[in-house]
Amino acid sequence: MRGSWAAAVVLGLVLLSGAAQGAPTPGSAASLADAYRAIHAARVVDLTHAFQPGIPHWKGFPDEVVRTPFTQKKDGFTAQVFTHVGQWGTHVDAPAHFHEGLATVDGIDPAQFVLPLVVIDIHRQAAANPDYQISMADVKAWEARHGPVPAGAFVALRSDWSKRWPSQAAFQNKDRAGVFHYPGWSLPVLKYLYETRHITASGHETSDTDPGFRAYKDDFSLESYVLGLNHFQIEFLANLDQVPEAGALAIVSFPKPRGGTGFPARVVAIIPR
């Protein structure tokens, strides 16, 4: 039921794309109307943290600075200046973040902004072992329940690490030696999802694709793998515990900085009631 609902909405959006390009799409108006009604009857879950100074971030990045040079009392309106790195808060990593010559943020196809949402849940494993890396057994268990991971999907890794927001210390989870301990992806799973299932993008609740004990050593080989395929990813997702494993849609959006390698993103899940 949920998968059929998501497929119907995606079909409507595909028809819209064809109509916008002048392609004949018999019945597209009715399909789009159905898609609109389905979306507005659905539940919406925000998968995005509000960003501010002091939030979790990569150890080498400076903190955000916010200034308010114009105020309603002084100028009749309020305007702020936000100074932060592109990879701030819930954010998109463009392929160019790690690979010169690949897609920058402004080069990501907006057709990839609406995607079937797959949530793979490892929160119990991560609670028992903060160094946990998702396994092929986890993926195969998901597929046994829901069928093959759909091509073109956005696959989100639920670890419940987002519940530690906004504490940098809680996110890093350092031991006495200063080593970080938080869960992450694994290469076999990423290769399977991108090369066999042909997903469009992936995301996670932690600050890195790689688990903390590797990121501590500046080993970002898993992130480099994803971005090297010319796919984007989203980091610091929120509220994945409020989303079903299958049947929802992800809407992923972000501004369009020319040549940008990353930028704060807004991600929501559309969930059938």
Image (cartoon, rainbow, N blue to C red):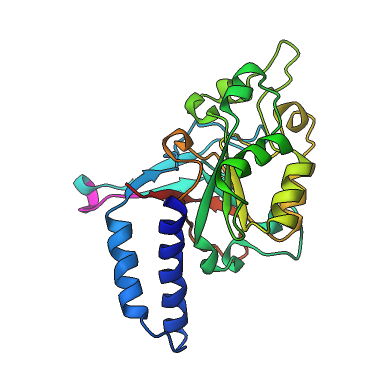
Q: Is residue 61 above or below residue 93?
A: above
Q: Is residue 230 above or below residue 213?
A: below
Q: How many marks?
A: 0
Q: Residue at x 54, y 47 (%)?
A: 118
Q: Is residue 113 left or right of residue 183?
A: left
Residue 259 drawn at (x, y percent) = 63, 64
| Stretch of the chain drawn in magenta | 74-79
Corner quadrant of residue 58? top right
Q: Is residue 216 left or right of residue 159?
A: right
Whether residue 205 can be seen here = yes
Corner quadrant of residue 73? top left
- Residue found farthest to the top: 176
Residue 263 drawn at (x, y percent) = 55, 52
Q: Residue at x 51, y 39 (%)?
A: 64
Residue 172 drawn at (x, y percent) = 63, 24
Q: Nearer the viewer, residue 206 or 138?
A: 138
Is 76 contained in the magenta span? Answer: yes
Q: Residue at x 46, y 62 (%)?
A: 7
Q: Is residue 136 left or right of residue 117?
A: right
Corner quadrant of residue 201? bottom right
Whether residue 233 can be seen here = no
Is 220 contained in the magenta span? Answer: no
Q: Nearer the viewer, residue 115 or 165?
A: 115
Q: Residue at x 71, y 24 (%)?
A: 131
